[in-house]
Amino acid sequence: MSLWQDVITTALVGTERRTLTLTPATNPLGQLLSQLNPTDPEATLLSAAGAISLYHRAGQRAITDNQPLPQPCPPEDKPPCSPRAAHYLKLMLQKERAKLLPEWLTTAATAGYRVPDYCLPELLEVGRTSPQLRPEILPILGQRGRWLATHNPDWNYVGDEDIEQTWTRGSLDARKLLLHHLRREHPASARERLVAVWQQEPSDGRIALLETFQIGLNREDEAFLDTALDDRRQEVRRQAANLLAQLPESALCQRMQQRIQSAITFRRRRNRLLLDFILPDYNEQEITRDGIDSKQPPQLLGNKAWMILQIVAATPLSLWSELQEESPAEWIQAAKRSEWDRSLVEGWAVAAMGQQNPEWAEVLLPFYSTFKGYLIPQNQLISGLIDVLYPEQRDSFFLNLFQSRKVAFDSKHPAFTLLTHYHSPWSTELTGTVLEGVRRYLATTDNPYDWSLSTALKEFAYFMSPDIVPELSTRLTNIVPERSALASYWTEVMDEVLAILNLRYEMNGMQKFQV
């Protein structure tokens, strides 16, 4: 019987019925066990068990891996960001100020720096869970980040720097990111790659890869997208139709234009334009191919209104001035006088966003409350229309809202809801105007319990101009009057706004990212 088996047997039977017999001291283990006190059998048993167990574990050979060692990481070709910038990144990766992460990534990439090595695992994991951040993450991974991603299947969205390797052997996510990049730099090259593999690509791959055509969409893409209208997968057909609807000169848009021309009727009363629609019997196969759903209208929307909405959304906006010499604002008023106002206004809004038409977008934005989100979710539609405006046009639009209503700024102000959808950088002037409006509100209101305003202000800080930071001390002086019923609460809110702006100001200083 082995010594270890003897220990187990004695433990099972009990020291009163069996005595543990230790081996002579012929080896180091025996020498150690010989020093145990035989007059205390329980202690002897426990001590022997511990010593034998430790002895066996210490004598085991280490597990060896016969796999060859991986190739070492190539040398870095970009400098790391500064320790201070890395500290901010670490905070964001730990979910503190996480909303600033996209801005941090863009700033670092623009400055030509990479992420410090110790942040790579967490950042790669962010890319796994947040696909929308992957295009911003890739440029700052450096060689070590790409090398690290090859050793974890969860990070396979990071492709090889060799374009051919990524396209032929990369995961679907990696190939999609590659097309995303190529669509920005060489749209034709990206299209040719997808055309070459389109028939062999599984349906999920066709859907994912076709999404990249939203970037750099141009008239040369039409022929390929038109073939996708005949795809066996409904999602592919709908996606292709949505893309073609953003090309006013495409054959699909021209077919939509003809449908409007054949259906719309006009008359005038007291010099006011009145309109109506008489929809003909469309060929079911033809309209379905063009992405029109004629069978399943959304709740509270009739079949005819649903058809009009979809056709208008895919019709070139230039048609309306050709039909009648009316401005976009006059067309909207005409729609308001008809029974199809919801379909027309939302259809025009979808068309303005897709066709990137700033003239129509500016006129439609004040009617945001009528958007029901039948084709595009309401929040996305409002944000999309704001993004369509030129940067200076956005500022003018919002500043005009403030000038037209020279009142204190609170959640009931006409600019408030639209500002909550303005997710692009604000100008210094707009930032100052909003802060001044808040100061006026707090100085004059008898009811400071505007929780919507206080919550929104913390969100606004992520888009306000950080260039205002040097003069914030004067702008924020006495912004919260001492007589305010919630002085301490509003002071905390403004301190939070100031903290976010200060951090963004430091981030946007390129020297802060230097080594």
Image: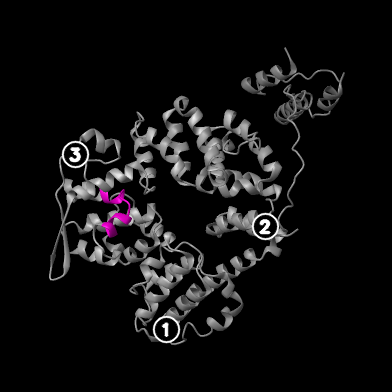
In this view, the residue farthest toward the top is: 1
Amino acid tagged 2: Ala
Left or right position of 424 against 140 = left
Main secondary structure along the magenta-highlighted residues: helix
**Magenta highlight on residue 251:** no
Q: Is residue 114 above or below residue 252?
A: below
Question: Circle 2: is it few (<14), some (14-19), or many (20+) Cα within 10 Å?
Answer: some
Q: Provide residue 486's location: percent of width, then percent of height.
A: 42, 79
> For residue 445, what is the image quadrant?
bottom left
Element carrying mark 2 = helix
The residue where tag 1 is placed is 440
Q: Note whether residue 469 is visible.
A: yes
Residue at 60% over, 70% down: 502
Q: Nearer the viewer, residue 246 or 483?
A: 246
Q: Provide residue 9's location: percent of width, then percent of height.
A: 66, 18
Q: Earlier in the sequence, mark 1 or mark 2?
A: 2
Q: Earlier in the sequence, mark 3 or mark 2?
A: 2
Classify the position of the C terminus by image quarter. bottom right
Q: Which mark is residue 282?
A: 3
